[in-house]
């Protein structure tokens, strides 16, 4: 599957980085391919968490973080080099990147997207629906005062909701 590097560069849009190479990989057992995106720095400036910028680094390590899905690619991974800088105030620390955290295997964008999806799902579950069901059961219970058979009582409850929630 051919992927245009320029399009991916526009979609990824990470400040200070550009897309160097794009490849796809299908893991065993997965039906969807994963997108592998190698990033390269636009300039050799490394930022400490205190805000200082450095032109040299102490050491570097290749990192891989999971990012947002892009089109048919349900999983995408960003590969980049993250450096450690020798800050006079803090010592040797991992550089500060605004789009990911040190020792975390996903980007902040993916974390925000998952949090937003969770909030949307949570907002769909209202207690008003449950309150309405409970109220209807209480009404049936009041009307059914004197039913000798509990089975018939449960059939009445099922019948009250059967027409609305039957799947055809």
Image (cartoon, grey):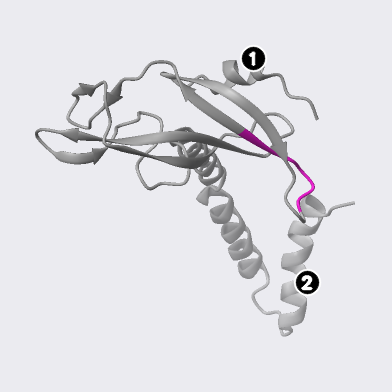
Q: Which quadrant: the N terminus?
A: top right
- Kindly state the secondary structure of the residue where label 2 is placed: helix
Q: Which residues are magenta?
A: 30-36
Q: Is residue 82 magenta?
A: no
Above or below 168: residue 154: below
- Which of marks 2 and 1 precedes in the sequence? 1
The one of 20 and 15 positioned closer to us in this rendering: 20
Q: Residue furthest right?
A: 168
Above or below 19: residue 100: below
Q: Position of residue 118 (x, y in %)?
A: 52, 44
Label 1 CA crowd tier, 10 Å (few <14, some 14–19, many 20+): few
In this image, 25 relative to 87: left or right? Answer: right
Q: Residue at x 57, y 34 (%)?
A: 68
- Kindly state the secondary structure of the residue where label 1 is placed: helix
Q: Determine the CA span between mark 1 and mark 2.
A: 62 Å
In this image, 76 relative to 95: left or right? Answer: right
Mark sitting on residue 155: 2
Q: Residue furthest bottom?
A: 148
Mark sitting on residue 6: 1
Above or below 91: residue 164: below
Q: Residue at x 23, y 40 (%)?
A: 93
């Amino acid at each position: 599957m051919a992927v245009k590097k320029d399009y991916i560069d526009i979609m990824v849009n990470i400040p200070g980085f550009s897309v160097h190479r794009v490849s796809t990989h299908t893991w065993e057992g997965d039906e969807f391919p994963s997108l592998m995106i190698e990033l390269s720095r636009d300039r050799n400036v490394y930022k400490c968490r205190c805000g200082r910028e450095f032109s040299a680094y102490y050491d570097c390590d290749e990192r891989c973080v999971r990012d947002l899905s892009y089109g048919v690619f349900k999983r995408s991974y960003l590969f980049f080099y993250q450096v450690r800088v020798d800050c006079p105030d803090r010592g040797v620390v991992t550089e500060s990147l605004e789009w990911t955290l040190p020792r975390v295997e996903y980007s902040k964008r993916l974390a925000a997207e998952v949090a937003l999806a969770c909030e949307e799902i949570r907002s769909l579950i209202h207690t008003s629906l449950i309150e309405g069901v409970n109220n209807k059961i209480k009404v049936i219970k009041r009307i059914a005062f004197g039913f000798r058979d509990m089975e018939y009582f449960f059939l009445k409850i099922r019948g009250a909701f059967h027409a609305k929630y039957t799947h055809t």
